[in-house]
Image (spheres, helix red, strand yellow):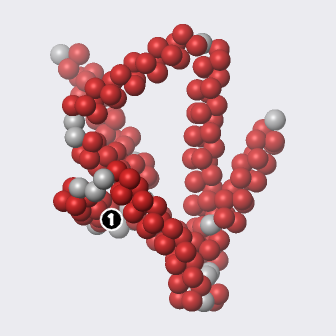
């Protein structure tokens, strides 16, 4: 069974790498930014998201317009980036070190995707095995989110969620998430002891 799981992971990673072939020159710098390999990258991430959300706040587009413009930008990026990269970079510029880094990125991304798939499978299994608990948790969570969405501005909630998603890889890579949790745990247990 472990061999089957590892071969499945390897197969998934190779498929992911094949799909990212034309994006490989973009993936390496993007990974560097998300993992905060330079100290000013978190500020870059926050500055970029703040600029985008400020533009959305100032322009106040309708939801359909916002979705359409977002999909239009993604379609244009998907069309132009591989074309520009094929012109811009030569085959000689791709080194063994870059290939090794791309393999590592694909491996980590593949593991994250498989973990999300396993989480989804466990949620579906919980729905089938413990429906009362599942629906109770769903109702409680969705009620809490509905109250939160009604209380706090949706654009602010989206801004916080996007920043949290974009900053999480760096926190995990630098180990700051673990140290923050450890600090909070020590603070809470210290208060209980005194």
* Total marks placed: 1
Report if residue 186 is visible in the image.
Answer: no
In the picture, measured across the screen, residue 173 lies left or right of residue 155, that is right
Outermost residue to the top: 132
Report if residue 41 is visible in the image.
Answer: yes
In the rendered view of the protein, which quadrant contains the C terminus? top left
Of residues 29 and 80, the one nearer the viewer is 80
Identified at 23% across, 55% down, the residue is 60
Up-down relation of residue 93 to residue 26 (above or below): below
Residue 182 picture location, percent across and down: 33, 34
Up-down relation of residue 117 to residue 174 (above or below): above
Identified at 60% across, 89% down, the residue is 90
In the picture, measured across the screen, residue 59 lies left or right of residue 14, that is left
Q: Circle 1: is it few (<14), some (14-19), or many (20+) Cα within 10 Å?
A: some
Up-down relation of residue 11 to residue 2 (above or below): below
Residue 24 picture location, percent across and down: 58, 72
In the rendered view of the protein, which quadrant contains the N terminus? top right
Residue 136 picture location, percent across and down: 47, 14
Identified at 72% across, 48% down, the residue is 9
Q: Which residue is mark 1?
A: 41
- Residue 48, quarter of the rendered image: bottom left
In the picture, measured across the screen, residue 178 lies left or right of residue 153, that is right
Of residues 124 and 183, the one nearer the viewer is 124
Identified at 36% across, 57% down, the residue is 65
């Amino acid at each position: 069974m472990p061999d089957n799981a590892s071969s499945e992971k390897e197969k998934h990673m190779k498929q992911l790498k094949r799909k990212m072939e034309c994006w490989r020159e973009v993936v390496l710098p993007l990974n560097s930014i998300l993992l905060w390999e330079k100290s000013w990258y978190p500020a870059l991430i926050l500055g970029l998201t703040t600029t985008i959300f400020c533009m959305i706040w100032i322009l106040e587009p309708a939801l359909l317009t916002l979705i359409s413009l977002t999909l239009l930008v993604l379609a244009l990026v998907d069309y132009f980036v591989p074309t520009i990269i094929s012109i811009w970079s030569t085959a000689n510029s791709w080194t063994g070190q870059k290939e090794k880094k791309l393999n590592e990125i694909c491996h980590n991304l593949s593991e994250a995707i498989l973990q999300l798939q396993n989480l989804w499978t466990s949620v579906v299994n919980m729905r089938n095995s413990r429906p009362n608990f599942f629906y109770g948790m769903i109702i409680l969570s969705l009620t809490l989110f509905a109250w939160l969405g009604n209380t706090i501005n949706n654009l602010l909630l989206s801004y916080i969620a996007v920043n949290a998603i974009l900053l999480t890889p760096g926190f995990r890579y630098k180990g700051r998430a673990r140290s923050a949790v450890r600090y909070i745990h020590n603070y809470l247990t210290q208060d209980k002891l005194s």
